[in-house]
Image (spheres, grey):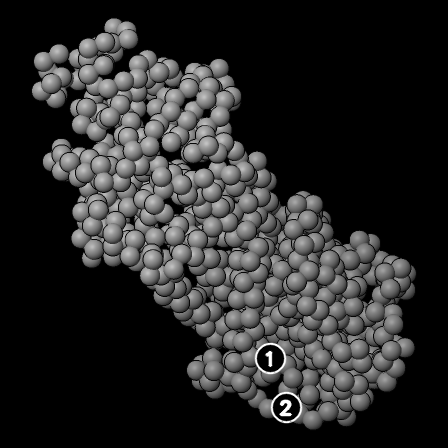
Amino acid sequence: MRHMNRRDAGTARVALGASIAGLGLLLLAASAPADELVVGSKRFTESYILGEIATQTAQAAGQPAVHRQGLGNTAILFEALKAGGIHLYPDYTGTIARELLKTEATDLDSLNRGLRPLGLGAAVKLGFDNTYALALPEAKAQKLNLKTIGDLRQHPELRLGLSHEFLHRGDGWPGLKRTYALPQSPRGLDHGLAYEAIAQGQIDVTDIYSTDAKIEKYRLRVLEDDKHFFPEYAAVFVYRLDVPQRFPGAWAALTGLEGRIDEAAMISMNAEAELGGKSFKAIAGEFLAAKGGAVSGRKTGSGWLALLFGPDFWRLTRQHLMLVFASLAAAVLIGVPLGIWAARQPLAAQPILGSVSVVQTVPSLALLAFLIPLLGTIGTAPALVALFLYSLLPIVRNTHSGLADIPPQLRESARALGLPPGARLRLVELPLAARSILAGVKTSAVINVGTATIAAFIGAGGYGERIVTGLALNDNGMLLAGAVPAAALALLVQVLFDALDRRLISPGLRA
Amino acid sequence: MISLKGVAKSFGSLQVLAPTTLSFPSGRTTVVIGPSGCGKTTLLRLMLGLMTPDSGSVVLDGEVLTRANAQTLRHRIGYVIQEGGLFPHLTAARNVTLMARFLRRGDEDVARRCAELAELVQIPYNVLDRYPRDLSGGQRQRVALMRALMLDPPALLMDEPLGALDPVTRHALQADLKNVFARLAKTVVLVTHDMHEAAHFADEIVLMRDGKVIQRGTLDDLLARPAEPFVSEFIRAQRVDPRLAAA
């Protein structure tokens, strides 16, 4: 779905600014080589396919190009584009107008007038329109005789399950409710889960988009927008204005795609991905081959185990481990001293514990959307910084409480022996607090394994890549192929730390 | 020899030690006694520099205790706090040798000294491999005493060393401790609230109340020539020793 920008990051910005500024060590720039065209795409089937088509079109024109696929939401893409982390990505005129420029006009000239000051442009109408619509099961629609969105007014008992983005964006539910005076109170759910929910009868109506492959599969009726509430959503490329000069060959080939993909073609490509189980690469390849372009791919998928241990398994594992342990190491290096400082200086304790707690309240997507412009890149660097920030609280708090809980007579004994402060910390206080500190590190590590799956939203890889793809394709096999190894890794980390406990905590302290 | 010259300490408006001048001579055991809250533990903490006096000075063998030299002067004063204060994450042996190892004393010297002390405090050498939680209360106090004596300090301060022990253990340790003090010939200062213990150990007794020294002298002095009625009252209240019972 075309995810909206969640603006809840704002309040936390001030609090986060200072701590992030000190994180120079994590800013390993993950940017592409200078001569490579970087194409982005959002986290839903159609965007993956269009991104892949753009990438292969550029490659066929002799331009080295990579596809950073499935990047979170509109805000993340937009920030990445402005920062130069990607060069272009597919979007829709209605989304650009309402979500990015906050205007009503959706024609290309108006859009470009708004985008130019940002160093961006919109071009190449691909030839189809993908607007929002509401749909419900055909059988239910017949029974209640529902044809238009306005007909919903007569049935307040219908349960609406809408994607979070649709629920909150200006051109989504709030406007629709006003225009049609709808009485229902919808609940939010992930778009990838909406079809299953409707098939199992947990919800009655959901938002879809008009090139959705699943309209047929789930036998849905699309309700007519008789008041023409939904605006035009023509598919175009949003690009940095320097792209035509920097990549002239690729740009010429991309403009050649204008008007080449009609609605039927898009629905059939979406269906090949979601129902036929074909890879995005293969679909894009076949499309371009049929239009006189690149070579065709092959159909993928056999057993689930083959999917689980697919060719990307080790790459994803490596990425996931790197994300978890690099951020954890940084959090230990900075969190333990912060905890010591908080324990030593009672005046510093509240500000330190307070700020690391505030970080936890920032939703992960908001944090990522905020980090991308700050770091000027997408991918590994912002993911590491986000995981680092989330790791701090358990480590800082447990270090602080572990030290604060040391009985006063033991501190006094250490002083009375004549040990200098550094030696007291190293030989007495830290070993006494070891159990608590390690418990904090273990908590951070296990939570990190789970949180690292969100790194896929900004193209940092890891098992989350499969989860994100699985959600976008409504493919439970793919989703599990990401979730199961993540869970297994969490268990493994737990076992590993239990072994570490036995090595690092004195037998004299064990229960 | 440790001397206090006009040492005073207050917490806010509460005076815990009135200006006090006292000296604790070498080779003698001085017992500081008094009811709870009389300032006796404060006296010990001031002598170790764990607390800075509001006025006056503490002098150890001619050297004035300051913030700057407190840490190294502590190497010359062994201190056993209430209930021992052993570090639970270290074995008994590691507790005893922690400071010597930190000061990079030779392994052989450390081991020899440790064996000597084990013999002195009457603890089997193999018990030293245990962690404090696996030691009895009496053993813990013996180990704490070894730790305090490891660097062979000229002075030994003990705060209620027998306070947390059962009567049988207490009795055995009392006898052993007195032998240790006799063999060591150090400046020993022992704090207690128990008159029986004071009578057992003391060459001299310092009786305190409300942050002031009421009387200093031998047990006989205190019995025969009480400085004020409180001295006799305090002693009478604790008639345990047969000699005290007769008073």
Q: Position of residue B42 (x, y in %)?
A: 39, 26
Q: Position of residue B154 (x, y in %)?
A: 36, 39
Q: Amino acid at mark 2?
A: Gly
Taking the spot 21% from the left edge, 55% from the top edge, the residue there is B125
Between disc 2 and disc 1, the foreground one is 2
Are there few (<14), some (14-19), or many (20+) residues within 10 Å of tag 2? some
Are there few (<14), some (14-19), or many (20+) residues within 10 Å of tag 1? many
Q: Where, quadrant-wise, is the C terminus of chain B in this rendering?
A: top left
Out of A34 and B211, give the one closest to the viewer.
B211
Out of A453 and B210, give the one closest to the viewer.
B210
Out of A173 and A108, give the one closest to the viewer.
A108
Q: Earlier in the sequence, mark 2 or mark 1?
A: 1
User: Does residue A178 sit above or below A244 in this rendering?
Assistant: above
Taking the spot 33% from the left edge, 48% from the top edge, the residue there is B150
Can residue A136 be seen?
no
Judge left or right: residue B93 versus residue A298: left
Judge left or right: residue A166 versus residue B131: right
Taking the spot 73% from the left edge, 72% from the top edge, the residue there is A31
Q: Position of residue B213 (x, y in %)?
A: 35, 16
Judge left or right: residue A493 versus residue A82: left
Specify the quadrant of the image occupied by residue A188.
bottom right
Q: Where, quadrant-wise, is the N terminus of chain B in this rendering?
A: top left
Judge left or right: residue B101 versus residue A289: left
Which numbered disc covers residue A297? 2
Of all chains, the one bearing label 2 is A
User: Does residue B174 sit above or below A69 in this rendering?
Assistant: above
Task: Identify the residue position indicated by label 1 in the image.
Answer: A273
